[in-house]
Image (spheres, rainbow, N blue to C red):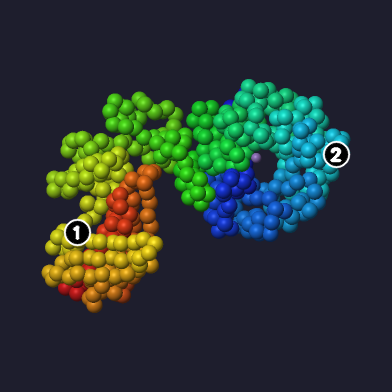
C-alpha cells in the first residue's frame, strides 16, 4: 500500500446527506454548506439530483455557478431526462448510476444484464460528448457478482469514464471483504476507484478506510455521517484516520472540521451525540481527576497524541467540579491568560458554585465564559442602571411582559413593557428605564449553548446602537436564556450611557 499519496474527498452531504429522514435543506442552507465545504477543501461537492425537482435543479445550478474551487457534481439515473437535467445544471461532473445486483435488477429495471452494460456505456459516452467529467456507479455493487461487476466497470472504462464508484448501497460490506473486493477491481481497472459506504452496521468508516488501503483513491463521505438510514461514512472521521494514523494526505483543511460540523448540525437539525468522534462535544473532554490532571501536564498522557483539538478546530475541555478549590480555578484561569484579582475571583467562584449547586457540570469553557463576563463588568459607580429585580413572563396565553425594578442614575424606577417575545419585552423595558436620555436599538442578537443539554450555559451576545452612532457588543452568560439576554442588554445600555457621559465631559 502506497502511503505517500493524496486521497480525494467527494462530499455528498448535500445529496445523500439530504436523504437523511427528516432533513430538507433550503436553497440558502445549501449555498451556505457548499461555501463551507469549499473552504474546508473538499475536492468534489455532490450538490444534488437535478431531475428530482425544479428546486433541486435550481440549487445545483446556483452552486455550480458560485465559482468554487471544489468541483460540483450532479447525480443522474441512466435516462436522458436525468442526464440532460444534470448537464443543464452546469455541474462540472455528472455521477450516473444503475443497479447491478440481481435483486435490484429483477425488481426495478427488468432488463437483461447485457442491455444494462450497453445502457451504461451509452450514458458514459453521452456525458463525455458533452465535455463533462463522468463518474459511474454500479448501484448495490457489494451485492453484485464479481464477474458482472468487472464486466460493467471495464466496459465503462473503455467508453471513457473518468472515475468509477463502488457503492455499498445497503451497508452490508465488512472491512476485510471490502478490502479484497477493491483490491480485485483495482487489478483489472486503470481508472481511479471511489467508494460510497453506508453505516447500517456501524462499519461505514471502517469500510471506507479498508478501501483506501486497498487502493481506492477517492472517498464519498458526508459531514457528521448524515445520510440515508444510518447514514454514510463521516468525512471528519475518515479524513483524520488517513491524516493522523496512516499519514495519507487529503486536501482537507482539518482545522475547519468542527466549524463545518456545527454548521451542518445546525442547518440539518440532526444533533450530534456528545461522544461523536473528532467533532463531538466530548471528543476532547476530561472529567477532573487523574485524567484531567495528566492532560493538563501533557495532553498525550490520556489522548491519542496523533490528534489534537486544535488540528480539527476543537477545544479541550476539563470538567470542573463544584468542589474545585480557589487555587485550582485561579491556576486554570491564569494558564488560559485571564488575570483576575481577588475580588473578581470571588465573584467567579460564586457563579461556579451557584451553577454546581443547581446540578450543572461546569467545564473550563463555562469557566472562561463566566470569567469574561465578570472581567467585562462595569464598576458600580459606572453603571447608570443598577437592577434590583427582573421578572419576565411568557406563555401561549399571555403577551410576553418584562417588569424591571432598578435604580436609574440614583433614582428608583419600576417599569414594564410588552414585546413580541421575552427578549423583545426585556429590551423595551430597558429602553423605557433609560428614558429620554438615550435612544437605543438592538442590532444583533446571538446565542450559543456552550455544552449540550437543557442545562447548558448559554452565551448571549447583543449589539446595541444609540442615536449618536455608538455601538457596543455585550456578552452575558447564564443557564436561563431570558435572564442572560436581559443581563447582556442592560450591560450594553450601561456601557453606551457611560460612553455618552465621557463624550460630554
Ligand atoms: Mn447512498
Q: Is residue 431 left or right of residue 40?
A: left
Report the quarter where the C terminus lies. Answer: bottom left
| Residue in view at x 25 percent, y 52 percent | 373
Q: Nearer the viewer, mark 1 or mark 2?
A: 2
Residue of label 2? 111
Quarter of the image for residue 152 reads top right
Residue 57, given in percent of the width and then of the height, sits at: 68, 57
Quarter of the image for residue 417 reads bottom left
Residue 353, given in percent of the width and then of the height, sits at: 21, 42
Find the residue positioned furthest to the bottom.
436
| Residue in view at x 66 percent, y 23 percent | 177
Query: Is there any visible trace of residue 474 in the rendered image?
Result: no
Q: Nearer the viewer, residue 333 or 281?
A: 281
Taking 281 as reference, is 460 above or below it? Answer: below
| Residue in view at x 70 percent, y 25 percent | 181
Q: Nearer the viewer, residue 465 or 177?
A: 177
Residue 282, given in percent of the width and then of the height, sits at: 40, 36
Q: Nearer the viewer, residue 329 or 157?
A: 329
Q: Is the CB of the residue bearing disc 2 within 8 angstroms of ligand 1? A: no
Residue of label 1? 378
At label 2, counting other C-alpha atoms closer than 10 Å, the crowd grade (few under 14, some 14-19, many 20 or more) is few
Amino acid at each position: 500500500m502506497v502511503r505517500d499519496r493524496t486521497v480525494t474527498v467527494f462530499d455528498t452531504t448535500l445529496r445523500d446527506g439530504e436523504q437523511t429522514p427528516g432533513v430538507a435543506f433550503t436553497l440558502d442552507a445549501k449555498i451556505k454548506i457548499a461555501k463551507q465545504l469549499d473552504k474546508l477543501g473538499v475536492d468534489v461537492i455532490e450538490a444534488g439530483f437535478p431531475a428530482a425537482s425544479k428546486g433541486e435543479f435550481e440549487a445545483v445550478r446556483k452552486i455550480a455557478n458560485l465559482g468554487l474551487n471544489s468541483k460540483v457534481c450532479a447525480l443522474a439515473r441512466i435516462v436522458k431526462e436525468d442526464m440532460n437535467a444534470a448537464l443543464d445544471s452546469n455541474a462540472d461532473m455528472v455521477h450516473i448510476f444503475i443497479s447491478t445486483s440481481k435483486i435490484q435488477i429483477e425488481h426495478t429495471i427488468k432488463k437483461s444484464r447485457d442491455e444494462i452494460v450497453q445502457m451504461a456505456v451509452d450514458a458514459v459516452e453521452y456525458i463525455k460528448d458533452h465535455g463533462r467529467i463522468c463518474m459511474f456507479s454500479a448501484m448495490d455493487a457489494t451485492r453484485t457478482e464479481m464477474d458482472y461487476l468487472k464486466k460493467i466497470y471495464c466496459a465503462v472504462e473503455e467508453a471513457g469514464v473518468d472515475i468509477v464508484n463502488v457503492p455499498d448501497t445497503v451497508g452490508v460490506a465488512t472491512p476485510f471483504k471490502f478490502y479484497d473486493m477493491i483490491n480485485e477491481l483495482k487489478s483489472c481497472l486503470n481508472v481511479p476507484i471511489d467508494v460510497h459506504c453506508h453505516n447500517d452496521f456501524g462499519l461505514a468508516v471502517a469500510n471506507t478506510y479498508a478501501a483506501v488501503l486497498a487502493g481506492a483513491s477517492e472517498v464519498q463521505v458526508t459531514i457528521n455521517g448524515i445520510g440515508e438510514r444510518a447514514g454514510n461514512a463521516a468525512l471528519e472521521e475518515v479524513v483524520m484516520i488517513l491524516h493522523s494514523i496512516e499519514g495519507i494526505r487529503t486536501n482537507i483543511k482539518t482545522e475547519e472540521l468542527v466549524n463545518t460540523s456545527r454548521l451542518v448540525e445546525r442547518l440539518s437539525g440532526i444533533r450530534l451525540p456528545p461522544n461523536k468522534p473528532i467533532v463531538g462535544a466530548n471528543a476532547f473532554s476530561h472529567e477532573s481527576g487523574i485524567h484531567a490532571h495528566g492532560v493538563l501536564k501533557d495532553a498525550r498522557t490520556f489522548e491519542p497524541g496523533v490528534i489534537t483539538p486544535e488540528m480539527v478546530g476543537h477545544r479541550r475541555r476539563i470538567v470542573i467540579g463544584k468542589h474545585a478549590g480557589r487555587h485550582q480555578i485561579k491556576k486554570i484561569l491564569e494558564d488560559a491568560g485571564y488575570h483576575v484579582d481577588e475580588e473578581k475571583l470571588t465573584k467567579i467562584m460564586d457563579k461556579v458554585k451557584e451553577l454546581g449547586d443547581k446540578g450543572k457540570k461546569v467545564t473550563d469553557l463555562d469557566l472562561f465564559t463566566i470569567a469574561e463576563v465578570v472581567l467585562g463588568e462595569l464598576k458600580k459607580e459606572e453603571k447608570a442602571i443598577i437592577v434590583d429585580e427582573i421578572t419576565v413572563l411568557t406563555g401561549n396565553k399571555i403577551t410576553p411582559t418584562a417588569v424591571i425594578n432598578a435604580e436609574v442614575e440614583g433614582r428608583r424606577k419600576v417599569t414594564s413593557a410588552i414585546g413580541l417575545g421575552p427578549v423583545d419585552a426585556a429590551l423595551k423595558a430597558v429602553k423605557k428605564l433609560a428614558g429620554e436620555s438615550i435612544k437605543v436599538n438592538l442590532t444583533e442578537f446571538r446565542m450559543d449553548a456552550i455544552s449540550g443539554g437543557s442545562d447548558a450555559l448559554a452565551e448571549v451576545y447583543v449589539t446595541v446602537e444609540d442615536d449618536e452612532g455608538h455601538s457596543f457588543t455585550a456578552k452575558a452568560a447564564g443557564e436561563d436564556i431570558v435572564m442572560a439576554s436581559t443581563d447582556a442588554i442592560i450591560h450594553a445600555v450601561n456601557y453606551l450611557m457611560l460612553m455618552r457621559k465621557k463624550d460630554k465631559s
